Amino acid sequence: MTHLTRRGLAGSLVAVLALPSLGLPASAHGALLGAEPATHHRIRLGDVEVTTIPDAAVMIDGPWPIVGQDRDKADVEALMRENRLQPNRFKPGFTPIVVNTGREVVLFDTGNGAVGFVPRPAGGRLAALLRPAGFAPEDIDVVVLTHCHTDHIGGLMEGDRRVFPNARYVLGADEYAFWSKNEPLSAPPEDNTYKSALVFRSHLLPLAERTTFLKPGDEVVPGIRAVAAFGHTPGHLAFHVESAGKRLLVWGDCAHHEVASLAHPEWHAVFDMDKQQGIATRKAIYDMAATDDLLVAGYHTSYPSLGYVARQSTGYRWIPLTYQLDP
Ligand SMILES: [Zn+2]
């Protein structure tokens, strides 16, 4: 915890001013230290550990039209201003999760790798950040993929080399069936669908013999089960992680922005392949998270990408995790 505290402090001006009185090294006294990106964040969930790792850190244009594609840009910008956020720039999380059950080390999604939505050096950091988080790539027993967009499967391979040499892979059966067809390759070359279809062929098809295909309700390992979350892609899955009565919902891309997606689940998301199904899934998943008081790991919510969901007068809101799980 000590190093986490120091890292948190070092990023703020308050910490610079307070350094001597805290007994920390004074070498930076009189100079700003600059941002020091987080490497991982770990929590305990029942008898398992959950570690979130930031694969990318980058400001991009949006959230309109990534969220609110069917609305006026001004509506989305107004919502950002109400929440004290920049109106047309945002910093999505790209946050794979490692669940260590003590028996198996399970990785959910693999980040951008060398070929994903956020190219290096801003993205594709997962493999390098595993070791500071206490894992080697060889330690990963199971790689679970929520879906096959480039920012989730790009980290499976480096060139021809499997990044997680001892892993088996788990993916929705409907997702695999869709991306195996030729249809996604008929999308325009600049389209996310076309790019993902290419990365599917280079990064996932070679792993097919090691891959298990799931339907909603199927078990990954004891305590981890698939949940239907179709719409973003044809076979997009969320996952329940349960240990000693504690629950975590890994929801993949059920939100692309923790304010806009949750406040307006009915707003179209530009990367949803089926807009209406995406809306229905967001409403169902948010309702379940709020009703069952679930801890949520949201891949594109702000790092460390853990939080809760509450109902508000219209839609829902995201409550980032702070000390709720501390003893
Ligand atoms: Zn994504």
Image (spheres, grey):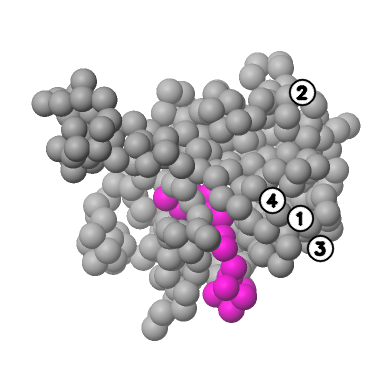
Cα gap from disc 3 to disc 2, whole angstroms: 27 Å
Q: Can residue 181 be seen in this view?
A: no
Residue 294 spot, x, y in % from top left:
59, 68
Depth check, front residue: 39 or 286:
39
Q: Was residue 294 drawn as part of the magenta stretch in this picture?
A: yes
Of callouts 4 and 1, the N-terminal one: 4
The residue identified by callout 3 is 217
Residue type at mark 2 is Pro
Cα gap from disc 4 to disc 1, whole angstroms: 11 Å
Of callouts 3 and 4, the N-terminal one: 4
Residue 230 spot, x, y in % from top left:
67, 60
Mark 4 or 2: the one toward you: 4
**Residue found at x 80% / y 26%:** 166
Quarter-wise, where is residue 167 in the image? top right
Q: Is residue 111 visible?
A: yes
The crowding category of the residue bearing disc 2, from other C-alpha atoms within 10 Å (few below 14, some 14 to 19, many at least 20), is some
Q: Is residue 115 above or below residue 309?
A: above
**Residue found at x 73% / y 24%:** 138
Pointer 4 and pointer 2: residues touching (CB < 8 Å)?
no
Residue 219 spot, x, y in % from top left:
83, 55
Cα gap from disc 4 to disc 2, whole angstroms: 23 Å
Q: Residue 165 carries which label?
A: 2
**Residue found at x 50% / y 43%:** 41
Of callouts 3 and 2, the N-terminal one: 2
Pointer 3 and pointer 2: residues touching (CB < 8 Å)?
no
